[in-house]
Image (cartoon, rainbow, N blue to C red):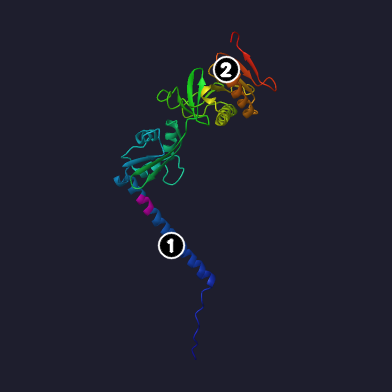
């Protein structure tokens, strides 16, 4: 009998592909497991190794606080493991950022507007600060509150440098806030602060074109009543501007009247809220 050669039946392509995909999935799982294990070992080593302990703390952008003060406010100290701090951090604003330290600095340092605290491998902490600038003194029944232009309280009754550094800052009288906590925004209506700054800015504009300067004679601006915004000159003349409208005209007229029409011995009120033309009412006996 004649023998016949039988060809081997080839395995279907879809079965081959299925088997190939299964092998690939197993290899990927093994690779992922190895990478995870390696990463875990690396993390454990980093968290335990003294090589990653904090040795230097650098601060930039601050004029009010020393590096030591910022470090103390942040809760960071040298000798602590940098990776361990990262892992214990509850707030994570970014890679290698210490959000808890950033919040602590902002809470403990009233002049700090924003803080960025970063861990730089192997052992350095970088603190970058954006500070608030003093913009005005709010007079609360004789107690000065130093604030920035956004109404954040920087100091209560500042002593050091108050007479020299900050005497050129505008003084504002307005409604009394319910609380005064350094670093927190005062609960004063924003329009009252904006109106006060607008009055001071307009006075500066008028002074820029006049020979006689009025700003050095201004004691304070009172915006506690936005319908009757006032400012005091030489503690003897009250200028009532009414609403914060046509400020340039009113303040320019007030400057002219104050220097040309009001005697240096007179006391009284110059009122721009009673009609088209201002009215000066002297005090009795003035």
Location of the C terminus (image quadrant)? top right
Range of residues picked out in magenta: 38-42
Counting from the top left corner in percent of width and height, residue 172 is at 53, 23
Q: Nearer the viewer, residue 126 or 239?
A: 239
Q: Is residue 21 rendered to the left or right of residue 66?
A: right
Q: Nearer the viewer, residue 100 or 107?
A: 107
Q: Which residue is mark 2?
A: 237
Counting from the top left corner in percent of width and height, residue 2 is at 49, 91
Q: Which mark is residue 129?
A: none
Counting from the top left corner in percent of width and height, residue 255 is at 59, 24
Q: Is residue 191 rendered to the left or right of residue 161?
A: right
Residue depth check, mark 1 versus mark 2: number of the one nearer the observer: 2
- Residue found 49% across the figure and 65% down from its top: 21
- Residue found 43% across the figure and 62% down from its top: 27
In this rendering, the answer to whether 50 lies above or below 73 is below
Q: Magenta span has 195? A: no
Outermost residue on the left side: it is 50
Crowdedness near tag 1: few (<14), some (14–19) or many (≥20) residues, C-alpha within 10 Å: few
- Residue found 40% across the figure and 53% down from its top: 36
- Tell me the CA gap for discs 1 and 2: 88 Å
- Residue found 46% across the figure and 64% down from its top: 24
Q: Which mark is residue 27?
A: 1
């Amino acid at each position: 009998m004649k023998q016949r050669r039988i060809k081997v039946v080839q395995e279907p392509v879809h079965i081959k592909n299925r088997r190939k995909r299964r092998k690939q999935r197993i290899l990927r799982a093994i690779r992922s497991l190895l990478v995870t294990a390696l990463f875990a070992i690396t993390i454990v080593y980093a968290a335990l190794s003294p090589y990653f302990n904090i040795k230097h703390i650098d601060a930039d952008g601050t004029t009010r606080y020393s590096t030591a003060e910022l470090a103390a406010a942040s809760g960071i100290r040298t000798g602590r493991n940098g990776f361990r701090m990262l892992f214990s951090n509850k707030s994570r604003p970014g890679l290698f950022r210490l959000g808890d330290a950033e919040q602590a600095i902002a809470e403990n340092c009233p002049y700090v507007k924003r803080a960025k605290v970063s861990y730089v491998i192997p052992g350095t902490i970088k603190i970058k600060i954006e500070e608030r600038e003093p913009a005005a003194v709010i007079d609360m029944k004789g107690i000065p509150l130093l604030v920035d232009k956004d109404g954040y309280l920087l100091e209560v009754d500042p002593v050091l440098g108050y007479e020299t550094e900050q005497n050129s800052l505008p003084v504002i009288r307005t409604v009394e806030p319910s609380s005064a906590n350094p670093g927190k925004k005062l609960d004063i209506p924003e329009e009252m602060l904006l109106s006060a700054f607008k009055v001071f800015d307009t006075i500066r504009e008028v002074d820029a074109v006049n020979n006689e300067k009025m700003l050095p004679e201004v004691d304070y601006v009172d915006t506690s009543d936005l319908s009757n915004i006032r400012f005091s000159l030489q503690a003897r003349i009250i200028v009532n501007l009414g609403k914060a409208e046509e400020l340039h005209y009113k303040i320019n007229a007030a400057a002219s009247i104050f220097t040309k029409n009001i005697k240096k011995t007179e006391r009284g009120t110059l009122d721009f809220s009673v009609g088209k033309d201002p009215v000066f009412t002297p005090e009795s006996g003035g």
